[in-house]
Image: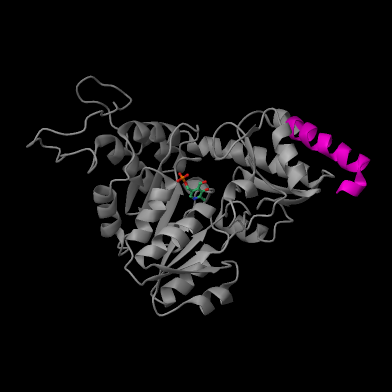
Amino acid sequence: MKVETIAIQAGRTIDKDIGAVMPPIHLTTTYQRGNDTGLVYSRLDNPNRKALEECLTALEEGSEAIAFASGMAAVAGVFQALQHGDHILLADDTYFGVRELTMNIMSRWGLQHTLVDMTDLAAIRASIRDNTRLIWIETPSNPMLKITDISAVAGIAKDRGILLGVDGTWATPILQKPLLLGADYVVHSSTKCLGGHSDLTGGVVVAREGAELTPSIREIQAIGGAVPSAFDCWLLLRGIRTLPWRMRGHCANALEIAEYLETHPLVHRVHYPGLASHPANRLASEQMSGFGGMLSIQVKGGTDVAARVAAGTRIFTQATSLGGVESLIEHRAPIEGATSKTPTDLLRISVGLEHVSDLLADLEQALNDQDKTRVANPDNQ
Ligand code: PLP
């Protein structure tokens, strides 16, 4: 079956009693003992979560999906399945929340880590230790849109008996299938494109058949309890039904905007894997079927100009998060705090599904405003 069909049909059942085409939201905490569904208590499992997990398993072509209450809970679920004293290789530009989780929280529980540039395969090999159990990559990465070669890193991991986890949030299973490229786990913040409407938080881990941490991650879901509500699972599944079509629109709008931004005099860098100027454009074309709706730009004039551009848009809302139908823009470094490695002149842009001509006009007026000031006051730059 093709992905458009899977997104709509997987995890879908018609209600036997009344013929409802859409599933009910099972707002119950607990289940009567002895019922023949095997359901006991909603934290352990519930029909809305089951349906969501079935759909995500099918989309990723994995063996099982484990849903969490947020993307961070999903990442933490994988890390917690490791043992005290284990070592993780972590992408040096991984989403800052994952870096903080590793440095500030997991380290207290004995998990060691090394930050590595995952685009440098020799550096990955050199950083592996005897106790390395997991390599954790994020591709495309947030917010620099670096592309990591999933198959190549999977090859290194396999040779050394190490697990590979891929945060595929920005690509979604529509544009990239890490498990088919050799990864053991793929994780998504389903808060983003999977939900697609900026009205929930969620996360998911999808496992390759036989990946050894899976029973432990399932236990962490049930006993750790960072589970999504039945309502959030329902909303998420509703969002996923249109994911393939939404991703087409995100990709088309983002490419057009990225090409335009490359020509704007205030912009000195555009990070978008679909551009020929992106250092990994070729690799991205090989391992992804589209380049997604996320891009970052760096503007001349530094942090103040970046802040003013973000404040000057009218259709793009200045806000954290991404992947919704509405376009967002964010001056990224200040939100990431003291440990941020993000350039201070960087704006992260989540391209939504409004008409591209309106989006282009909005960015143009916000950039032109600041460019006029820059040209009039060259000494201030
Ligand atoms: N991974 C990536 C790549 C992200 O962009 C984010 C959030 O922006 C997360 C993980 C964390 O997801 P959540 O906010 O749902 O916990």
Q: Residue at x 93, y 40 (%)?
A: 376
The spot of residue 274 in percent (x, y) is 67, 50
Q: Residue furthest top?
A: 18
Q: Is residue 366 found inside the magenta-colored segment of the image?
A: yes
Q: Residue at x 41, y 65 (%)?
A: 107
Q: Residue furthest left?
A: 34
Foreground residue among 261 and 253: 261
Asked whether, in this view, residue 165 is left or right of residue 252, the answer is left
Which contiguous range is marked in magenta?
A: 361-381
Q: Taking the image as drawn, is residue 225 in sight?
A: yes
Quarter of the image where one finds residue 26:
top left
Foreground residue among 258 and 223: 223
Give the answer, above or below, for where 92 lies relative to 362. Answer: below
Give the answer, above or below, for where 19 lies relative to 120. Answer: above
Q: Is residue 16 found inside the magenta-colored segment of the image?
A: no
The spot of residue 179 in percent (x, y) is 42, 58
Give the answer, above or below, for where 27 lies relative to 143. Answer: above
The spot of residue 250 in percent (x, y) is 60, 38
Q: Which color scheme is applied?
A: one colour
Give the answer, above or below, for where 79 lies relative to 169. Answer: below
- The secondary structure that most of the magenta stretch takes on is helix
The quadrant of the picture occupied by the N terminus is top left
Asked whether, in this view, residue 256 is left or right of residue 292, the answer is right
Q: Residue at x 48, y 33 (%)?
A: 242
Asked whether, in this view, residue 13 is left or right of residue 130, the answer is left
Foreground residue among 120 and 208: 120
The spot of residue 294 in percent (x, y) is 61, 45
Q: Residue at x 38, y 45 (%)?
A: 56
- How many badges with numbers are in the image? 0
Quarter of the image where one finds residue 312:
top right
Q: Taking the image as drawn, is residue 167 in sight?
A: no
